Image (tube, rainbow, N blue to C red):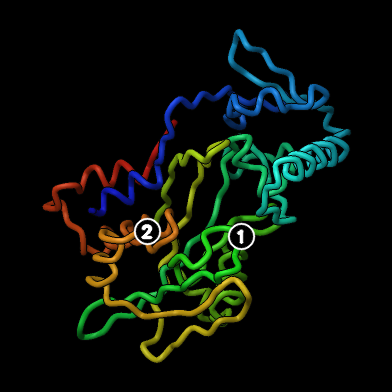
Amino acid sequence: MALLDRIDDVNRRLPHRRYYRLYANHQAIGWLDTQLLDELDSALFTITTQKQRVDIRFAPAQRQVFESRIEQFFRRYFAKHQLTGWRDEHYAVATGFGQNTLFLLERAALSFLGIRGYGVHINGYVEGKDGIAMWIGKRALNKPTFPGKLDQIAAGGLPYNLSLRENLIKECHEEASIPRQLAEKAQAVSAISYYYDLPIGIRPDVIFNYDLRLPADFIPQVNDDEVDSFHLYPMDELLAMVANTQAFKFNSAVVIIDFAIRHGLITPEHPDYLALQAGMHQQW
């Protein structure tokens, strides 16, 4: 196993997959897995097979009505297929980051429509005479997604009603008891993008990465039911774990690789340096 395997994990491609382009009021917003075509509600989705596209149309004045109808469609779909992971969190659907919101959608439904989600991941690290060490959280065993996997000290998807900075501060407090005045010192450093095939659907996501240098005597404390515990790892040990195990949440492993590159722990002399860089910045 190698670091490049983690890049392959996050850009997983499943065989025999086909996607139709998804539009909302003539604006491209996602990629719809053709496995879903027969399940779509014709009152919400218009399929044009010849053009391999699916359209959603609604009058702006009827946006809330549409949001309610598409949420009910996915609630029925989840119930029919006995799916778990419903969040009761609404994310903004737009043509790109920072663009006008077209409508709000339940977080768990994003991947079924191949709609890009955004999140923040915080690298909480300390520096000492022995180099850099990073605080890593272990996800709670009852989490609906990736239970028990290793993760950043704090991370979270971006809901429609918070800015990146507001979300960062919220996640730092909720997951690791990091006080606001310390969380505000986090520095925006990079972004990664990837395309991850699911059994049905795809995650074409973007993660905004932040570095937060922590005091040597700071110890994160579990503050909600999403985190099991924290552990401080020297970076050489951490990179070996990333390369040789699948202990990490699939995208969190890539955030660590990005951190290591930026801090000079993975250099251009690494045989996979360019492939690692390219794999963290995927475009469809």
Q: Between residues 77 and 117, which one lies in front from this camera angle?
A: 77
Residue placed farthest to the top in the image?
Answer: 50
Say which residue appears at 54% left-offset and 55% top-offset.
Answer: 119
Q: Between residues 118 and 242, which one lies in front from this camera angle?
A: 242
Quadrant of the image occupied by residue 187: bottom left
**Residue of label 2:** 253
* Whether residue 265 is situated above or below residue 126 in the rendered picture: above
Say which residue appears at 48% left-offset and 62% top-offset.
Answer: 121
Q: In what element is the residue under mark 2?
A: helix
* Whether residue 175 is situated above or below residue 155 in the rendered picture: below
Q: What residue type is labelled 2?
A: Ala
Q: Between residues 266 and 50, which one lies in front from this camera angle?
A: 50
Residue placed farthest to the bottom in the image?
Answer: 217
Is 268 on the left or on the right of 174, as rendered? left
Q: How far apart are marks 2 and 1 (CA)?
A: 19 Å
Say which residue appears at 62% left-offset and 65% top-offset.
Answer: 166
| Residue 228 horizontal/vertical position (percent) | 53, 77
Q: In what element is the residue under mark 1?
A: loop
The image's mark for residue 166 is: none
How crowded is the residue under tag 1: few (<14 C-alpha within 10 Å), some, or many (20+)? few
Would you say residue 84 is visible in this rendering?
A: yes
| Residue 277 horizontal/vertical position (percent) | 28, 46
